[in-house]
Amino acid sequence: MRVRIQVTLHMTNAFNIGTGAMAGSPANKPLVKNRQGLPYIPGSTLKGRLRHACEAVARTQGEQICGSPVPERMCPDSEEVGRGQLCPACRLFGSPWYTSPLRFSDLTLISPFKPGSEAKAIRTNLRHGVSLSRQRRVAEEDLLYTTEVFLPGGQVAFQGWVEGNIQDADLTLLQDGLTSLYAVGGRKTGGLGWLKVEAELFLDGAETPVRRLKEGRWQDVQATA
């Protein structure tokens, strides 16, 4: 079954989707931006967070999940699941030996700034933090760091697509994962990157959605028309 899901992430507070490159930023953990200087959410970021959410859902349903993200413990070489088999998460998101049937687009900024907005309109702030020693449980000396965050003072939303050919049972898990997705980016435990998800599900190339996710619930479009 061919599925296409339009995903919209409404950020409810400041967030940092990081990049490994400093890119001229004064922050130790800069915000990833496109060529226009606008922040965006890479498809790989959504894929990773959504996989984590789907794994949690599958475990609560009694499914066996491999030992991701450790390659040696992932399907189809997983002792947790059984060699030569694929767990529900790997069927959806792939493993080092199996290509995911899903494709994830980058999520671009749709509110409050449209694509093509001037980069100078984007304002970011720096949040200061200090690294902690896990062994000593105290702050490390000389390890103050800064995180670049985006919070323009208005509603911030990003939109992109997830699409591919999957089975009915895997689609159900994917929808449940989207429902339980609550944050992306760095410092989630520190309160950054929390969000609300909206989505529309299209099947087999149809131009109109069959289901919508809003306020934490999937509903048939016919029932809400």
Image (cartoon, rainbow, N blue to C red):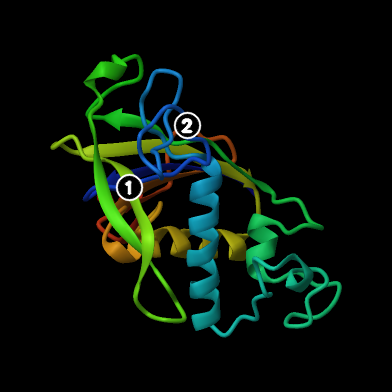
Residue at screen point 68% across, 75% down = 66
Instruction: Using residue 97 as the reference point, say whether residue 60 is left or right of it.
Output: left
Tag 1–tag 2 contact (CB < 8 Å): no
Q: CA distance from mark 1 to mark 2?
A: 45 Å
Q: Which residue is mark 1?
A: 146
Measured as percent of width and height from the top left, residue 29 is found at: 41, 45
Label 2: few (<14), some or many (≥20) within 10 Å? few
Residue at screen point 29% across, 16% down = 117
Measured as percent of width and height from the top left, residue 170 is found at: 60, 62
Q: Which of 28/54 is in front?
A: 28
Q: Which of 1/41 is in front?
A: 41
Task: Say which label, 1 or 2, has the lower sequence index.
Answer: 1
Mark 1 or 2: in front is: 1
> The residue under label 1 is which amino acid type?
Thr
Q: Tell me, for residue 207, which label it has, or none.
A: 2
Measured as percent of width and height from the top left, residue 2 is found at: 63, 44
> The residue under label 2 is which amino acid type?
Glu
Measured as percent of width and height from the top left, residue 197 is found at: 33, 51
SS of the residue under disc 2: loop
Instruction: Using residue 212 as the reference point, say whether residue 175 is left or right of it.
Output: right
- Residue 75 appears in which quarter of the rendering? bottom right
